Each structure stands twice: as C-alpha cells, then as structure tokens.
Image (cartoon, grey):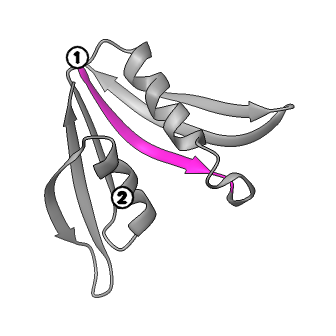
C-alpha cells in the first residue's frame, strides 16, 4: 500500500510525496513540487517528514540520471548512488539509497 503526503499553502497543493513502507524500508515513488513553488524548501520538508514519521532503516529512490536538481538534492541529503540503469536510448535512471 502506498502512502501519499501533500504539502499545502492556503489550501493549494504545492508538493507531494508517494511512498511505500515495507518492514523498515521506505521506497519513494514520487517526490514532486509544483513549478510555481520550486526553491522554497518543500521537497526538503516532505523528505524530513518521512524520515521523522516512519521508523525505518533505509530509504530508496530512483530519478532520471540527467535530472540534476533531483540528483543534487538526494546527494545533499546523504543518499548514495547504488546503480544506474539504461531504460532507453536517451534515458537512464539513477538509484539512490540512504541508511538511517
């Protein structure tokens, strides 16, 4: 079962995170912020909430390898690159993991 958490400002949904928790591991399926709210710390708030809310040992996530803001965000938050997978001729995914 997936859990969705939204971040609202004055009843406007500005960002959301979708996760699945199994045992003591969180898989982040989506972490999104509306473009009008980029660079306001919303992604950080959502990630911090997940880290505090759930008693987990590991958090895993994948993002497009060329998505520099996302790659930088996860590295800044202590995630380690575990693998890169080519999905097509022009697309690769980078997988990250963080031990808590």
Secondary structure under tag 2 reads helix
Q: Earlier in the sequence, mark 1 or mark 2?
A: 1
Q: Which residues are magenta?
A: 24-34
| Mark linked to residue 62 | none
91 to 97, vertically: above or below: below
Question: For residue 53, which quarter of the picture?
Answer: top left
Residue pictured at 20% horizontal, 21% vertical? 57
Foreground of the two, 74 or 96: 74
**Residue 81 is inside the magenta segment:** no
Q: Residues within 10 Å of mark 1 (few under 14, many from 20)?
A: few
Residue 80 appears in the picture as rendered:
yes
Q: Which residue is under mark 2?
A: 72
- Prevailing secondary structure class for the magenta stretch in the rendered image: strand
- Residue 11 lies left or right of residue 90; in this view the side is right
78 to 91, vertically: above or below: above
Residue pictured at 28% horizontal, 65% vertical? 93
Dividing the image into 4 quarters, which one contains the N terminus? top left
Foreground of the two, 67 or 26: 67
Q: Residue 94 location in percent, x, y?
A: 25, 61
Secondary structure under tag 1 reads loop
- Residue 81 lies left or right of residue 74; in this view the side is left
- Residue 28 lies left or right of residue 56; in this view the side is right
Query: Outermost residue, right direction?
Result: 10
Query: Outermost residue, bottom direction?
Result: 89
Q: Residue 46 location in percent, x, y?
A: 52, 33
Residue pictured at 22% horizontal, 16% vertical? 23
| Mark linked to residue 23 | 1
**Residue 27 is inside the magenta segment:** yes
Residue pictured at 58% horizontal, 28% vertical? 5
């Amino acid at each position: 079962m997936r859990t969705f958490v939204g971040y609202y400002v004055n009843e406007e949904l500005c960002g959301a995170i979708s996760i699945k928790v199994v045992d003591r591991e969180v898989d982040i399926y989506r972490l999104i912020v509306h473009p009008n709210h980029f660079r306001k710390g919303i992604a950080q708030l959502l990630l911090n909430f997940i880290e505090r809310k759930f008693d987990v040992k590991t958090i895993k996530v994948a993002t497009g390898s060329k998505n520099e803001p996302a790659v930088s965000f996860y590295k800044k938050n202590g995630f380690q690159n575990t693998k890169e997978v080519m999905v097509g001729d022009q697309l690769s995914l980078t997988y990250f993991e963080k031990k808590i």
